Amino acid sequence: MKNLLIPFLISLFLFSCTDESEMDLMLERNQIHDISDTNFKNSDKVNICHKGKIINVNSNSVLVHQTHGDAVDMDGDGYYDQENECGPVDFDDSNPYITENIALNKRAFASRSWMDHVPATAIDGDHDFGWNAGARPTQWIAIDLLSDYNIEQINLTVDQFPVTGSTIHNIYFSTDGFSWTLVDVLDGVTNANDVLISSPSAQPARYIRVETTVSPSWVAWLEIEVYGSSVE
């Protein structure tokens, strides 16, 4: 019995001492490929954020990466299941509706605008230049999606100076642009370039209004993205 126990303890010790380089080797054997290699982009592949780099791996190796602490983008929408260096976090990464930004290049209106920071710049896909009211709260921006959608998620990229401060943003939905329903309140300390995520229970809306009542700076958003499904 003693002769059997000693080899077992030795093997257990060696396994527990597996360092990060050995783990990386294990990951490589699970067919890691750079995302830039389009030959590996298909339905059997999944995007992973590994050490700040997006890689494309076999779906059967996802568990290995998750054990290693990597973030996973299961549905290929650019959002991940946990905090990472590659992209924002998805509220439900298995949700098939989080695939297309339905606000992109639609219509936008606002309480006011400063110079060329007009409302349309908050929904044009450019995260470096957006809408700015040129004034402190209370200010608002509204988006017309042109038809009714069941809204699943709204991502709002913060633009503010001072770069850190307490903010309150109220999110309203409407189907006609006249009657508004408060569906979410984002209340907390925010920083410039933060991505705030609103996940209201799926509700039909054509219009979305984001009203800022508290902010340390002029009210502004670099980008507002909306995800959902068409109302049948």
Image: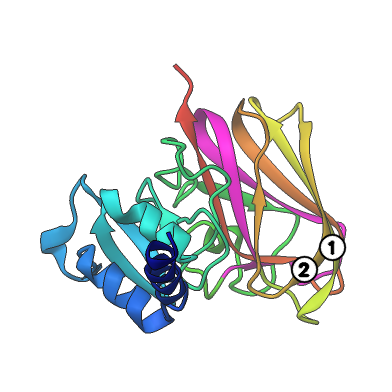
* Helix, strand or loop under label 1: strand
| Quadrant in which residue 143 is drawn | top right
- As drawn, is 191 to the left or to the right of 137? left
Magenta stretch: dominant secondary structure: strand
Q: Quadrant of the C terminus?
A: top left
- As drawn, is 147 to the left or to the right of 63? right
| Quadrant in which residue 7 is drawn | bottom left
The earlier-in-sequence mark between 2 and 1 is 1
Mark sitting on residue 190: 2
Q: Are marks 2 and 1 in contact (CB under 8 Å)?
A: yes
Q: Amino acid at mark 1?
A: Thr
Q: Which residue is mark 1?
A: 167
* Helix, strand or loop under label 2: strand
**Residue 136 located within the stretch drawn in magenta:** yes
Q: Residue at x 37, y 58 (%)?
A: 64
Callout 2 environment at 10 Å: few (<14), some (14 to 19), or many (20+)? many
Residue 14's place in the image compared with 155, above or below, is below
- As drawn, is 211 to the left or to the right of 207? right
